[in-house]
Image: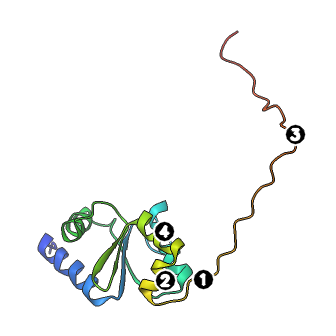
Amino acid sequence: MTTTNEEIRKFLEQAIGENHVMLFMKGTPDAPRCGFSMRTSGCLNALGVQYAAMDILPDPRIREELSGISNWPTIPQLFVDGQLVGGSDIVLEMFESGELAELLGVEQPVLEPEPQAEAPTQSAPMGLENRLSN
């Protein structure tokens, strides 16, 4: 028996309504299938929140119906309390500013600054060889 588009839409609406934090992504949090989904689930993981996640890849109709519900064309899509928060760029920006932690009612983690590579004191030749002409 084939699932209809209406059944998919109802399932998605139910998932959004029943889960405090719902992430639609490519792949799973343990095995994301794109960098945007990896970054979005990584933000949620860093905050230590519990969330539901759904892989949209098994059936293209999932993405079609989800976009119809949210009016948001791209994946991932994060919903909190039934409301679309946004995609990867918005979630990352909110994570970095502390807004995501505030929205989810959790503490913003103290992030260690990325180690900066020291600039070389002397510029060395790049060692490229021109092999385009004889």
Q: Earlier in the sequence, mark 4 or mark 1?
A: 4
Specify the label residue 101 is tagged with: 2
The answer for how far apart the CA atoms under marks 4 and 1 are is 14 Å
- The C terminus appears in which quarter of the rendering? top right
User: Which sits in the foreground, 64 or 111?
Assistant: 111
Tell me the kind of residue under disc 2.
Ala
54 lies left or right of 102:
left
- Tag 3 residue: 122
Q: Is residue 113 above or below residue 104?
A: above
- Mark 1: amino acid: Pro
Q: Position of residue 28 (x, y in %)?
A: 44, 73
Choose between 65 and 90: the one closer to the eye. 90
Drawn side of residue 127 relative to residue 7, left or right: right
**Residue drawn at (48%, 87%), measured in percent from left and top?**
49
Residue 12: give x, y in percent of width and height: 24, 78
Q: Residue 109 carries which label?
A: 1
Q: Which amino acid does label 3 sit on?
A: Gln
Q: What residue type is labelled 4?
A: Leu
Identify the element where label 1 is drawn.
loop
Asked whether the residues under the numbered discs 2 and 4 touch, taking CB atoms below 8 Å apart as contact, a structural biologist would say no
**Mark 4: which secondary structure?**
helix
Dots 2, 1 in contact, CB < 8 A: yes
Q: Residue at x 53, y 83 (%)?
A: 47
